[in-house]
Each structure stands twice: as structure tokens, then as C-alpha cells.
Image (cartoon, grey):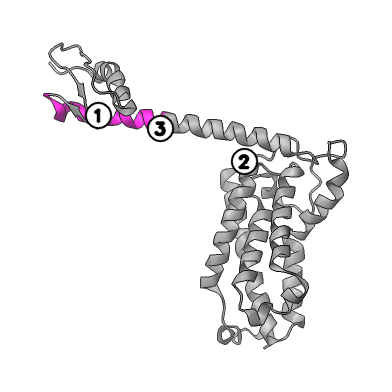
Amino acid sequence: MCPSIGTILCAECWCCLCSLLGYGWVATPTRDTRKLALILPTGRVNRKDDRQSQPHLVLIQHSVVLTALIKSMTRLHVWDESLSSRMAVCAEQAAPWGAARPILKALELSGHGIPWILAAIIGILQGDAESRIVWVNVLLALLLDLIIVGTMKALVRRPRPSINRPDMFATISVDCYSFPSGHSTRVAMLATILFLLPDTITEVFFLYFSSATVLVWVFSVAISRVLLGRHHVSDVLCGLAIGYGQAYVMTILWLQPEVLKRWPFVLF
């Protein structure tokens, strides 16, 4: 008579666990004492009715792996929140580094979307033909960033750290969520686009700012998000990676002059 699923799960759970841990072999009797499981070092199971029991072993193996993954993610989440809380030394004026809060809020503004969108519009209206091409694409990149970050925040809905103060500049509804850091995605994207542009376009910019200065700005804006208590560490790290990816998406979507000449408002 075929044993029930519950019997097989109870009898073979230890068998599967030993297999995953790499033990040589172990015998596990089920309700039918004639059935014995032999665990090989490779993790394979030999038994007379292997065809019947193998689906249950796969289920047990997947359950063990999933449980281990959940535990690892839980530990990572706890570590992330603990580290973020310890690093939020400028979250309020009375915090240990509260005196630096105005400087960090200035960095926050430098990575905000509104100043960059205004700068792009001014560049389109006031720049020469070559710079207009760049500013149109920068504006497109900023809009792409807003769509991606806004969508991800609305889907993930991770709350901001409890230590955060509601004094951010020009926020919208999804800005109450934490993942990913929009400032981090934006500065990483803009810096990467700058480094990918031809030297003929960036030579004027680099007369005043070195590449090291740009990298320091990106790092400073990103770390300020944690120091101000706005974001968790993982929000910022993932934001930087997303921004880097957005910049390479823009290399594919980059609008060329012959395309922009069809847009009368660009004023070519």
C-alpha cells in the first residue's frame, strides 16, 4: 500500500537535509519498513520505488532551500535597517552630527529632479545647436528616471526609516516610500551619461570640473541620503546600480540631430 504524503514528508525530511549537508548516507524507514533511502555524497537518492518518491524529495529540497533563502534575506534586512539607523547621524538637529545637516540638505537639493529639469529646459532654449542635442537627451533621461523610480516605489512600497523627518523639498505621493533612492539613481545616471559623451561636448565642462569632482559629488549625494535618515543603505546601493543601468539604456535611446530637427520646439 502506498504511504501518504505526510508520512513520506516526515520520514524523508531528515534524509533530504542530510543530503543537502553532504553526509555520506543515512537510512530512513517509512511506514513500510522495507523501504530504505540511501543518501549518496552527490545528493542523489537510490530506492526501489524512486519514480514514486522522487517528486516528494524535490518538494522537500525546494522547501529547505526556500527556507534558507528566507532566513538569509531576513538577516540581511535586519542588518540593513540596523546599519542605516546607526549611520543616520544627521537625521535631526540634535543628532551627533546635526550641525552638518544644512550642508547635506544642499547636497540633497543638488540631486533633486526639479533643478535638473529646469536646467535642461533652459539649456534647450538658450544653448547652441550642439548643446541642445545633449540637453534634450538629458531631459528625456530625467523623465525616464522619474517613471522608473516612481513605478518601483509604488510597487515595492518600502517605508522610509522611522528616523526620517518630513522636510524634503517638493515631494509627491510616492516619495513617502524608500526603495529605491531617487537621488542616487539620478546622480549616478547623470554622471555616467557625462562620462559617455564625446570629448568634444564635455571639454568645456571639464575645464571647470574634473572627473574626480563628479565622482565625489555622486558619492556625497548618495551617502547624504543615509546620513539624513532619508533612506536605508540598500535603497542607495540599488539606486546607484539602477541609475548606472538607466544611463546605458539612454545610449540606446539617444536622439540624434537628424531626429531632433523634426521637433520644431527644439529650435534647431
Which is closer to the viewer, label 3 or label 1? 1
Labels 2 & 3 near each other (Cβ < 8 A): no
- Who's the residue at 61% across and 75% down the image? 197
Q: Is residue 138 above or below residue 174?
A: below
Mark earlier in primary sequence (1, 2): 1
Q: Main secondary structure of the magenta part?
A: helix
Q: Which residue is mark 2?
A: 158
Q: Nearer the viewer, residue 92 or 19?
A: 19
Q: Amino acid at mark 3?
A: Leu
Quadrant location, the C terminus? bottom right
Q: Nearer the viewer, residue 3 or 48?
A: 48
Q: Where is residue 242, by image quadrant? A: bottom right
Q: Is residue 54 magenta?
A: yes
Q: Where is residue 122, by image quadrant? A: bottom right
Q: Which residues are magenta?
A: 48-67
Residue 65, position as x, y percentages in the image: 38, 32
Residue 153, position as x, y percentages in the image: 61, 48
Q: Is residue 32 magenta?
A: no
Q: Which residue is mark 3?
A: 66
Q: Is residue 101 left or right of residue 257?
A: right
Q: Amino acid at mark 2?
A: Arg
Q: Which residue is mark 1?
A: 41
> Which label sits on residue 74?
none
Residue 105, position as x, y percentages in the image: 81, 51
- Who's the residue at 19% across and 11% down the image? 31
Q: Is residue 211 above or below residue 45?
A: below
The CA distance from mark 2 to mark 3 is 22 Å
- Who's the residue at 70% across and 64% down the image? 212
